[in-house]
Amino acid sequence: MSQHGRRLSGQMLLLRLKELVRLSGDAELQRKDVHLHTLRHSIATHFLQNGMALERIREFLGHTSLESTQLYTHLLSLQHHGHAHGSQQVPGIPVTERLQHGFY
C-alpha cells in the first residue's frame, strides 16, 4: 500500500525491491538481476522447502492449475541433486534463474 492507502503499481514495487537490494549492502545480491518474478519464485521455493502443501502454494501464487505450481517440485529436485538436464549446468547460477533465462 502506498502512503495514501492505494495499491502500488508493479513498477513501484520493482523500484522498492531494487532499493532494498541496494540498501542490503550485499555485493553478491547486488550483482544479480533481481525482479518481482525472482522474489515470487524464491518465496514459493522456500514454502515448499519448509513443507507447505503444494495446493496451499498454488493458492498463494494464484495459479489456476496445480501443474504450474508443480514446476517448483522439479526445480527443487534439480537443486537437491545438483544437476540440470543435459549439459545445461551453469555453476553459481540458481536453478530458478537458469530456468527464467532459458537454460532448459
Image (spheres, rainbow, N blue to C red):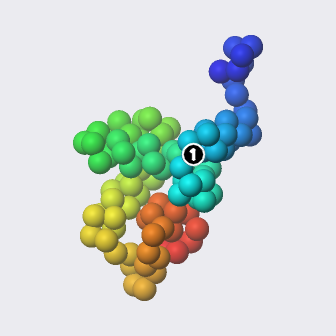
**Residue in the image at 61% along x and 40% along y:** 23
Q: Viewed as shown, does residue 73 lie left or right of 29?
A: left
Residue 88 screen position, x and y as percent: 46, 81
Q: Where is 52 relative to 26, above or below?
A: above
Q: Nearer the viewer, residue 67 or 87?
A: 87
- The three-letter amino acid code for the residue at tag 1 is Gly
Q: Where is 82 relative to 73, above or below?
A: below
Q: Viewed as shown, does residue 58 lie left or right of 29?
A: left
The answer to whether residue 9 is seen in the rendering is yes
Residue 25 screen position, x and y as percent: 57, 45
Residue extending furthest top? 4
**Residue in the image at 43% along x and 86% along y:** 87
Residue 101 screen position, x and y as percent: 58, 68
The answer to whether residue 66 is seen in the rendering is no
Q: Nearer the viewer, residue 86 or 3?
A: 3
**Residue in the image at 47% along x and 60% along y:** 96
Which quadrant of the view contains residue 43? top left
**Residue in the image at 34% along x and 75% along y:** 83
Dot 1, crowdedness within 10 Å: few (<14), some or many (≥20)?
A: few
Residue extending furthest bottom? 87
Where does the N terminus fall, quadrant-wise?
Answer: top right
Residue 61 screen position, x and y as percent: 48, 40
Q: Viewed as shown, does residue 38 lie left or right of 51?
A: right
Q: Where is 84 relative to 23, above or below?
A: below
Q: Give the number of marks.
A: 1
Which quadrant of the view contains residue 33? bottom right
Task: Write down the residue under mark 1.
Answer: 25
Circle 1 — which element?
loop
